[in-house]
Amino acid sequence: MRVVRLVDELRSVLDEHLTAGLSVGLVPTMGALHAGHLSLVRRARHASDIVVVSVFVNPKQFGEGEDYERYPRDTEGDLELLEGERTDIAFLPSVEHMYPPDATVGVAAGSIGDRFEGADRPGHFDGVCTVVTKLFNIVEPDLAVFGQKDAQQVAVLKRLVNDLDFAIGLDIAPIVREPDGLALSSRNVYLTLEQREQALALSRSLELGRDAFERSGDPREAERAMSEHLQDAGGVEVAYTAAVDPNSFEASQPGGPILLIVAAYVGHTRLIDNLLIVRANGGGD
Ligand code: AMP
């Protein structure tokens, strides 16, 4: 595995592969890698000749007062895990290299980036779009792999690829969970043992929401069940629960797929989770 920190070096390494006609898969991450990230790397490995994994804690997607400074960082551990997944190139740029002080231009997510996560974290999806656009331009991958864990990010990035005409395939990997249902997240390391238990209320609320929808056929019943469970759960402060259209993040369409989404604080840690319900032939609504 080659560890690259500079854009020019990465480009010249990739040029050699491109002239050899090899396909390139990109997995963007913020590091502190866990089994969820590694599942993405495996998908890229399966589909591409050359696998590039970026590890970059992107300051532009953190708001003021968020956890940018204390976000978990473990370069050595990350490189070991990436080596184990037969990654070809680990790209670890510095903040100054990605965002030189004279840079002024960024990419705006638009209205899809203003709802839910974007409403609670203003500018978050602009930061995501900017860094992903830069990575797409630097790596020029055939395929980029992202996780369903960040469902709104997936919806925003599908728009990015579509609206800005990137000729890049997106592959979306399912959420990797702990055996008890907790979605893996780099932020789970912030949780105490007690909070780790309390955090199970998120995945549990999604299951209850799905059950309520399956019973009633009504997305509003799903929302009610999720929010009731989280209100009653100890140690959890709800940010939002909703049943939305997974592509637009607006109200779900009659007969269309429904995405149940939840965000909540456990202590100071903000966690998100989601569950996709694909309806068989127009039931519900
Ligand atoms: P992050 O390092 O949190 O920016 O995540 C990098 C990529 O890994 C994103 O595409 C995430 O959606 C994905 N990811 C994070 N956690 C999980 C998980 N539990 N299961 C699947 N993918 C994940």
Image (spheres, helix red, strand yellow):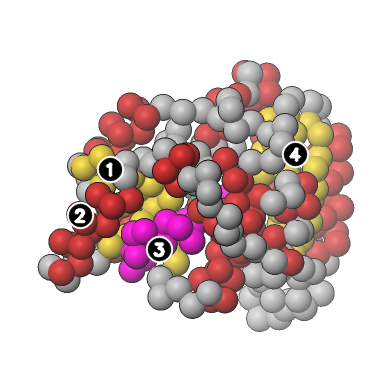
Q: Nearer the viewer, residue 147 or 212?
A: 147
Residue 31 visible in the picture? yes
Q: Nearer the viewer, residue 142 or 233?
A: 142
Q: Which residue is mark 4?
A: 264
Q: Considering the image in quadrants, where does the N terminus appear?
A: top left
Residue at 45%, 33% in the rendered image: 32
Label 4 and label 3: CA atoms lie apart by 34 Å
Q: Amino acid at mark 2?
A: Val
Q: Earlier in the sequence, mark 4 or mark 3?
A: 3
Q: Callout 2 environment at 10 Å: few (<14), some (14 to 19), or many (20+)?
A: some
User: In the rendered structure, which segment of residues is drawn in magenta?
Assistant: 132-150
Q: Which residue is mark 2?
A: 13
Element type at mark 4: strand
Tell me, yes or no, whether the highlighted magenta stretch contains residue 12: no
Element type at mark 1: strand
Residue at 58%, 55% in the rendered image: 104
Label 4 and label 1: CA atoms lie apart by 36 Å
Q: Amino acid at mark 4?
A: Ala
* Disc assigned to residue 4: 1
Q: Determine whether label 2 and label 3 are within 8 Å by CB.
A: no
